[in-house]
Image: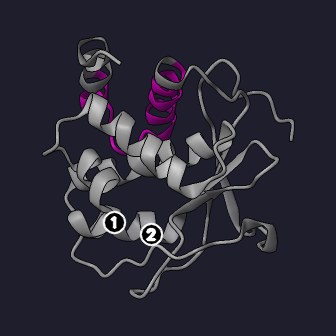
Amino acid sequence: MDKIQLREFFEEYETIDANNYSHLFDLIRRIVSRVLRKSRPGILLGLEDLGFHPQGFVGGYHRVGTNEIYLNRNVLQMMREETPKDHYKAYLFHLLLHEYIHSIGVIDEHKTRDFTAIISRAIFDTKHPVYKIAAWGLNALFPHEFYEGHFEPEEHTPRNIEFIQLEHHDSRLTYI
């Protein structure tokens, strides 16, 4: 993976508004397609109230066997309000990248984290917030105690969901 070839992704990342989920997600899809040579069409992106507790929270999840990715609206709101804008954007990018990698068939959490860190390192330098989160976890940037516990999406029924319109060529597909 040539860092020079991936520089265009860094430059595009820098121009994206932190609140533009669609543009950020489209960038992630293209990055993963280039680096891992895999993609997943028709992703449905939902924001869901999953709560936040200083001892732990679920940032997002992919429901295995579906084209659905859910992000914790409560955590996103807290981070948007309480952290620097570049840190919020880095967290959102990291979270979307991680869950998208799950959606292309990488179910193992350790492999997903490894791919997320490898991709983040290839695009961003080691001082960039995206890479710091991927390499060292949320505690690298955020002044909160975060716990990366296990979440079993099979036992969770999504509720109070707001779907985000993704503006890429396959976002109109709604199959599961």
| Dot 1 and dot 2 residues touching (CB under 8 Å) | yes
Residue 19 at what x, y percent from top left?
39, 45
Of 151 and 23, which appears nearest the observer? Answer: 151
The residue indicated by pointer 1 is 79
When asked about the image quadrant of residue 146, the answer is: bottom left
Q: Amino acid at mark 1?
A: Met
Of 50 and 145, which appears nearest the observer? Answer: 145
Magenta stretch bounds:
12-33
With 86 as the anchor, is 53 left or right in this view? right
Q: CA distance from mark 1 to mark 2?
A: 6 Å
With 1 as the anchor, is 129 left or right in this view? left
Residue 149 at what x, y percent from top left?
52, 76
Secondary structure type for disc 1 = helix
Residue 4 falls inside the magenta stretch: no
Quarter of the figure with the C terminus: top right
Q: Secondary structure of the magenta portion, mostly?
A: helix
Which label is found at residue 75? 2
Quarter of the figure with the N terminus: top left
Q: Amino acid at mark 2?
A: Val
When asked about the image quadrant of residue 138, the answer is: bottom left
Please indicate, yes or no, whether residue 1 appears anywhere in the rendered image: yes
